[in-house]
Image (cartoon, rainbow, N blue to C red):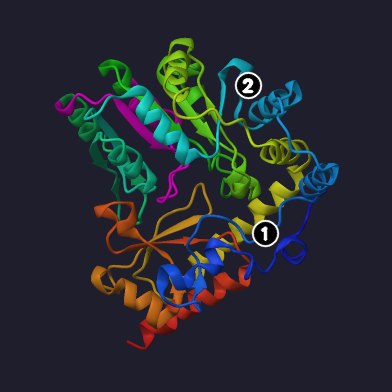
């Protein structure tokens, strides 16, 4: 059943204040002002589908939360979702579980590299990529993405190859859809990248947590399907239903490893890091969402696409020197502010003049300085308010 944008917002938008919500209730802690309009943390201001809440409520009313197996139906449901949407079926043997993609990043770094080994990332990129490498006592090597005057980003394959050879890279961590620049890498782009990794013996970790958030019917290509699965012998896929269905607090994500040797290597490391079983409520929510959340998901994509176009159109009209990167995937808008605001003035501009809480671009790497990331997964009214505040603040300068 199709749900209109007004119906979805009326039914699922919810005030999250005073619920210990990081996005809304930690503004004083992180920005020094509890009254900012939050556009920062990457979760959504929408309730999960009714079926998910009902399933969780029923389980909670059962009242027992003891040791639980991962059912065959869980594996089948997750596999079916990936077959339907992305054209591949992860086999039961591929599955490993973790509390989230960020812990998975740490475990992958420790499993496939040794202290002081070089690890390559493509910046600007989600800041835990940096943390997972540095905190694990590995050498962080970065290849900057390049962009045109419209903010459209691409990989610099020559630079990537140069750095793989120069530093003898052991592990590449990449993401698609890309956080924060919004690209969904094409199969051709991924195949060129992976061919380099194959040539030089580099393992690839692919963060695909935003795989279900496609804008304007963009097509997502999972790394494991590239060239018919040619590169699975060096691939680790990280994903979760948490971004898609707003389940991050339930602590469940997947690590798909098709290659038996890579699985053994991963297991050898993680067995001394964690013996935690998958979260019982996280599994239930994920399975129910994949089974019964299709209409909700389709309506969510319509809301996010609407918000992106409203955001882009208002700002392009009122502040034409802003560069808003084309959004192909994720619900995160990436904006180059430098033609209006100097990088060192960005914090004062947003927090004091606009009264907005955003993620500053230098959080994602030095080449993000002067940029800002905006979370669009909220009520459309807040998108309009944010644009109006930015327009007014710049006009008043």
| Residue 362 screen position, x and y as percent | 30, 58
**Residue 204 in magenta?**
no
Q: Is residue 176 visible?
A: no
State whether residue 383 is above or below residue 43.
below
Q: Is residue 278 visible?
A: yes
Element at label 1: loop
Q: Quadrant of the C terminus?
A: bottom left
State how far apart marks 1 and 2 are (Cα).
29 Å
State whether residue 321 is above or below residue 239.
below
| Residue 39 screen position, x and y as percent | 50, 66
The residue at which mark 2 appears reads as: 89
Could you say which is closer to the camera, residue 59 or residue 144? 59
The residue at which mark 1 appears reads as: 46
Q: Nearer the viewer, mark 1 or mark 2?
A: 1
Q: Residue at x 57, y 31 (%)?
A: 276
| Residue 48 screen position, x and y as percent | 71, 52
Q: Which region is colored magenta? A: 166-195
Q: Residue at x 60, y 57 (%)?
A: 44
**Residue 169 in magenta?**
yes
Could you say which is closer to the camera, residue 269 or residue 333? 269
Residue 214 appears left or right of 268: right
Q: Residue at x 22, y 27 (%)?
A: 164
Which of disc 2 and disc 1 is earlier in sequence? 1
Element at label 2: loop
Residue 128 appears left or right of 167: right
Residue 350 is tagged as: none
């Amino acid at each position: 059943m199709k749900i209109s944008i007004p119906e979805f917002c009326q039914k699922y938008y919810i005030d999250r204040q005073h619920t210990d919500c990081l996005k809304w209730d930690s503004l004083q802690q992180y920005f020094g002002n509890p009254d900012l309009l939050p556009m920062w943390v990457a979760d959504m201001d929408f309730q999960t589908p009714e079926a998910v809440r009902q399933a969780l409520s029923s389980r909670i009313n059962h009242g027992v939360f003891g040791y639980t197996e991962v059912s065959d139906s869980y594996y089948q449901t997750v596999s079916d979702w990936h077959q339907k949407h992305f054209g591949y079926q992860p086999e039961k043997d591929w599955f490993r579980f973790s509390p989230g993609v960020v812990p998975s990043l740490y475990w992958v770094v420790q499993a496939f590299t040794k202290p002081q080994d070089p690890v390559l990332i493509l910046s600007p990129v989600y800041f835990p990529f940096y943390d997972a490498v540095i905190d694990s006592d590995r050498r962080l090597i970065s290849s900057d993405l390049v962009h045109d005057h419209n903010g459209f980003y691409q990989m610099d394959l020559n630079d990537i190859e140069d750095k793989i050879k120069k530093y003898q890279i052991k592990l590449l961590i990449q993401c698609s859809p890309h956080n924060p620049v919004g690209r969904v890498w094409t199969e051709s782009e991924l195949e060129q990248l992976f061919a380099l990794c194959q040539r030089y013996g580099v393992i690839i970790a692919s963060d695909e947590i935003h795989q279900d958030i496609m804008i304007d019917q963009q097509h997502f290509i999972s790394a494991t399907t590239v060239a018919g699965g040619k590169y699975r012998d060096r691939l680790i896929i990280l994903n979760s239903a948490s971004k898609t269905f707003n389940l991050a607090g339930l602590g469940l994500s997947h690590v798909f490893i098709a290659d038996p040797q890579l699985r053994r290597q991963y297991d050898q490391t993680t067995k001394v890091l964690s013996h935690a079983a998958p979260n019982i409520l996280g599994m239930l929510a994920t399975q129910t969402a994949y089974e019964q959340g299709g209409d909700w998901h389709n309506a969510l994509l319509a809301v996010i696409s609407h918000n992106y176009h409203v955001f882009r159109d208002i700002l392009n009209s009122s502040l034409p020197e802003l560069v808003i990167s084309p959004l192909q995937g994720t619900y995160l808008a990436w904006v180059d502010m430098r033609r209006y605001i100097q990088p060192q003035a960005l914090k004062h501009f947003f927090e004091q003049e606009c009264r907005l809480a955003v993620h500053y671009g230098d959080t994602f790497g030095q080449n993000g300085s002067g940029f800002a990331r905006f979370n669009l997964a909220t009520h459309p009214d807040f998108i309009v308010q944010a644009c109006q505040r930015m327009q007014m603040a710049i006009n008043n300068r």
